[in-house]
Image (cartoon, rainbow, N blue to C red):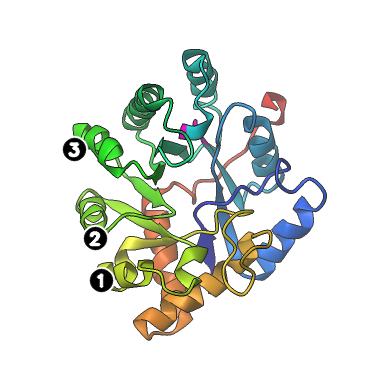
Amino acid sequence: MRFIDSHGHLYREYYEADLEEVVARSIEAQVTKIILPCVSSLSIHDIFESAASHPQNLFPMVGLHPTDVPDDYERELEVLESWLDHDGVVGIGEIGMDLYHDDEKVEQQKIAFERQLRWAVERKLPVSLHIRSAYAEAMSILRQFEGTPLTGILHCFSGGIQEAEWAIRHGFLLGIGGVVTFKNNKLQDIVKEVGLAHIALETDCPFLAPTPYRGTRNESAYIPIIAQKVADIFECPIEQVAEATTANVERIFPLNNLRQLKQQIL
């Protein structure tokens, strides 16, 4: 049995004192592959350092988080785009729109989001989408890419069944994390309705730890807790959840290619 954490910030920015121990615990918990999202150029060196240290387990993405879009976003996007051709990049993310935390840079978020989606299509890379309190705005941009090879994961899915159905029709997975273990949440109903074939497991560590660790620092080793909750929803063995969700992610993200991350780029 093996798991993939499709979204975990497992680098020194968040795990300065004990990164190696956290990675070791994850592997011991059979979470053998972890995809590392990028939020800005300030994260990029830490991300590639982690991936270079664990090339069989940690896989870097490149992207600009919507709440990290700066005033000089053109320059920021230029810097990030320069990293896309480095060895080992498996996706573009996390990108999207967030009007919950930042509703003052709507136009800048839209421009950055569309630009990065174009990178994904041009390079045939999957995306990790961050959408919060902005589904109408984000969907209006995503619909421009219908008919292209664009695919990926709706990270920390928080939409309704209509958004879930759109995602599935267009080849996206729903990222399911610790929230599914919380009491009185609607995500469990959506998971049951869409089925195992359309979900990916994630932690978003160090954020959103699952019950019973809610409120503490999250880590990829907690993926089996999330998987067990999903197994309970479907009344199936956890091994079935592990097999299905791992296959789902590996179908979309190029995690099985042999890689050599060049230390000189760090």
Q: Residue shown at 43%/75% (left/top)? A: 230
Q: Position of residue 83 (x, y in %)?
A: 54, 25
Q: Position of residue 66 (x, y in %)?
A: 46, 33
Q: Which residue matches tag 2?
A: 161
Task: Name which residue type carries label 2.
Answer: Ile
Vertical comparison of 121 with 236: above or below: above
Local SS, label 2: helix
Task: Name which residue type carries label 1.
Answer: Glu
Residue 65 makes an appearance in the image: no
Residue at mark 2 to residue at mark 1: CA–CA distance: 8 Å
Mark with earlier residue (2, 3)? 3
Within-10-Å neighbours for mark 1: few <14, some 14–19, many 20+: few
Within-10-Å neighbours for mark 3: few <14, some 14–19, many 20+: few
Task: Name which residue type carries label 3.
Answer: Glu
Q: Position of residue 192 (x, y in %)?
A: 30, 74
Mark with earlier residue (2, 1)? 2
Residue at mark 2 to residue at mark 3: CA–CA distance: 19 Å
Q: In this image, 180 relative to 197: left or right?
A: right
Q: Which residue matches tag 1?
A: 193
Within-10-Å neighbours for mark 2: few <14, some 14–19, many 20+: some
Q: Residue 146, which numbered label?
A: 3
Residue 158 makes an appearance in the image: yes
Question: Would you say the magenta stretch is mainly helix, strand or loop?
Answer: loop
Q: Residue furthest left?
A: 147
Tag in front: 3 or 1: 1
Q: Are marks 2 and 3 in contact (CB under 8 Å)?
A: no
Based on the picture, tell me whether residue 198 belongs to the magenta stretch. no
Q: Position of residue 180 (x, y in %)?
A: 45, 68
Local SS, label 3: loop
Q: Residue 37, which numbered label?
A: none
Question: In this orientation, which residue lies closer to the viewer: 166 or 134?
Answer: 134
| Part of the protein shown in magenta | 62-66
